[in-house]
Image: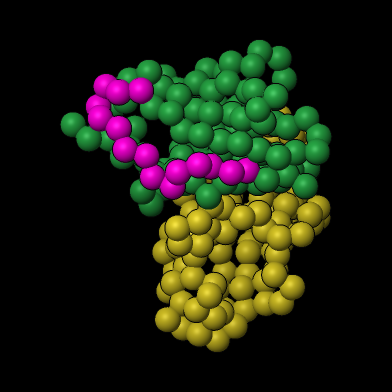
Amino acid sequence: AQSVTQLGSHVSVSEGALVLLRCNYSSSVPPYLFWYVQYPNQGLQLLLKYTTGATLVKGINGFEAEFKKSETSFHLTKPSAHMSDAAEYFCAVSGGFQKLVFGTGTRLLVSP
Amino acid sequence: NAGVMQNPRHLVRRRGQEARLRCSPMKGHSHVYWYRQLPEEGLKFMVYLQKENIIDESGMPKERFSAEFPKEGPSILRIQQVVRGDSAAYFCASSPSTSETDTQYFGPGTRLTVL
């Protein structure tokens, strides 16, 4: 069975600061990993995904994540936060038949 | 190319009534997934359907919940005799194939409130 742990239900940064959202996974098979963003009262939008190959994955809006098998991690980063990045971020692992198993989410707050 | 459509966006039901949530996948997608998001929680998988087939319903409550994806028309998630604990956001996603590397595209969700 797969599971995802997102450390920190809330993360606060200042505009222009580094964004780091943590995600650790558990999987009995090679994982496929995803980061989604959810803006208030909207659906989820894919930021990036790791399937195979290069372990550093670049996504939309300047976000990237690195798959580290030895640490079972897939942390999301962005060098410089923007006010528009304020949202909820979900890490997910595929659980067979493309069923996604989500973490509990991290709410990113960006202050001016 | 229109995205995943869900309607209604908001649904209010009294305890004991039925709720019907509809999902139209993206054009060309024949795989539909339903997820439920309880307040302050992540999304939980409910069911995976292809046209006229339920592939995986391991996340569906055993009673009162059912889902279908007919040959024609949208996928329907049906909740009979709703209770307050059913209040949640229900999201539908679609993908073009069964590959685990495919992206699931999510709709805007239906927010169900049970009074």
Most extreme residue toward the left, as rendered? A112
- Quarter in which the C terminus of chain A is drawn: top left
Q: Is residue A96 left or right of residue A32?
A: right
Place of residue B31 in the rendered image (x, y in percent of width and height, measured from the top left): 71, 44
Question: Total number of numbered labels?
Answer: 0
The one of A66 and A84 positioned closer to us in this rendering? A66
Quarter residue A82 falls in: top left
Place of residue A36 in the rendered image (x, y in percent of width and height, measured from the top left): 51, 37
Asked if the magenta segment contains residue B19, the reply would be: no
Shade representing chain B = yellow
Asked if the magenta segment contains residue A15, the reply would be: yes
Q: Is residue A96 above or below residue A32?
A: below
Q: Is residue A32 visible?
A: yes
Q: Is residue B71 above or below residue B97?
A: below
Q: Is residue A24 above or below residue B66?
A: above
Can you tell which chain is drawn green?
Answer: A
The one of B98 and A74 positioned closer to us in this rendering? A74
> Residue at coordinates 33% horizontally, 20% vertically from top-left?
A80
Quarter residue A35 falls in: top right
Place of residue A19 in the rendered image (x, y in percent of width and height, measured from the top left): 38, 27
Q: Is residue B79 left or right of residue B60?
A: left
Place of residue A39 in the rendered image (x, y in percent of width and height, measured from the top left): 38, 43
Most extreme residue toward the front, as rendered? A71
Q: Is residue B14 left or right of residue A54?
A: left
User: Magenta part of the protein: which range?
Assistant: A4-18
> Residue at coordinates 61% horizontally, 73% vertically from top-left?
B79
> Residue at coordinates 54% horizontally, 80% vertically from top-left?
B83
Instruction: Give the image's coloring scheme.
Output: by chain
> Residue at coordinates 79% horizontally, 54% vertically from top-left?
B56
